[in-house]
Image: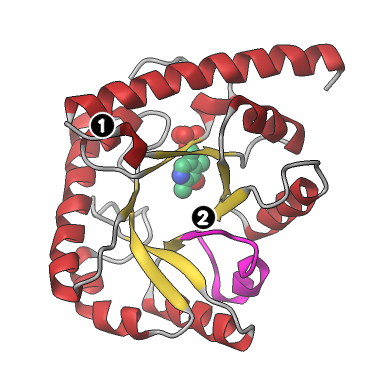
Amino acid sequence: MTDEERMSYETFVAERRAQIMELVGQAAARAGRDVSEVTVLGVSKTVDVDKVVCAWHAGYAGFAENRPQELRRKAQAIAEIDGMQGVRLDMIGNLQTNKVKQVIGIAHLIHSVSSLHLAEAISKRAVAGGTSVRGLLEVNVSGEQSKGGFTPAEVTEQLDELLALPGLSIEGLMAMAPAHDSAAARATFSGLRELRDELRVRSGLPLDTLSCGMSDDFGIAVEEGSTLVRLGRVVFDPAYPLGV
Ligand SMILES: *Cc1c(COP(=O)(O)O)cnc(C)c1O
């Protein structure tokens, strides 16, 4: 970006952020929730580091990537920017067991722990590296074939085993809603919350984090209890029409 392009992008991202935070605040208020319970992550997978820096200036405290290699690349670039060291980068995409080592020690939180097999691989790597990894269990609440993650029955069945894995700390659940269907989105998010409430009783653990809500459905997600919304296009794309 030229200096001029950067200045105009900074203005766009800051104005857009104010609109987004206003909508998050309104959705929280409709649900009688405190807006401070909701963290907004910028999903930076389609933009380069210079735009991430603009978003950081605008106030986003964390970002998320869906590919291990890109997560590493962004983490390295961010580490070289004054003041940005330690800015949160989360892993939100499909993670293969042979890529686990690429994200351990870099991802602040792995939202996409999508099977017992993957959880075991993360645990093994974390223990070998003398570290601990924070994770969310990705659940296919809507039951769409195209979506990964545990079925609600699997996560319930395998919960004890998952929670017993050393080096992996399960802090909550993550889900994605069907696209372009706000009723289905609401059912997905409320289903996720209800599943979490059941697992909370079973495990005695808080499982406080509910990662749900993207550009098209974050207002609904916040109404239904999301604590972590993952916003890509609405944050970074001036052509994305905002209106939730
Ligand atoms: C890309 C992506 C997002 C952000 O999607 P937008 O619709 O651009 O907000 C959120 N979560 C995951 C898992 C993604 O891959």
Residue 181 image offset from top left, x and y in percent: 25, 31
Could you say where residue 51 lies in the image, as x and y percent from the top left?
Answer: 70, 30
Determine the secondary structure under disc 1.
Answer: helix
Residue 83 makes an appearance in the image = yes
Q: Decide if residue 225 is on the left or right side of residue 68.
A: left
Query: If you read the primary sequence from the N terminus, does the residue marked by circle 1 or circle 2 appear first?
Result: 2
Vertical comparison of 171 with 218: above or below:
below
| Residue 78 at x, y percent in the picture | 75, 46
Q: Is residue 239 visible?
A: no
Task: Measuring from the top left, give residue 7's x and y in whole percent.
Answer: 75, 14
Near-viewer residue (234 or 19): 19
* Tag 1: amino acid: Ile
As drawn, the label of residue 212 is none
Identify whether 174 is placed above or below 62: below
Seen from the viewer's position, the closer of residues 85 and 51 is 85
Q: In which quadrant is the C terminus drawn?
A: top left
Q: Quadrant of residue 219?
A: top left
| Residue type of the residue flagged with mark 2 | Gly
Bin the neighbour count of mark 2 within 10 Å (Cα to Cα): few under 14, some 14-19, many 20 and up: some
Q: Residue at x 66, y 28 (%)?
A: 57
Magenta residue span: 91-110
Residue depth check, mark 1 versus mark 2: number of the one nearer the observer: 1
Name which residue lies at 56% across and 40% down.
Answer: 61
Residue placed under numbered mark 1 in the picture: 220
Residue 91 located left or right of residue 47: left
What residue is shown with label 2? 93
In-image side of 110 versus 37 (left or right): right
Whether label 2 lies within 8 Å of ligand 1 gets the answer: yes
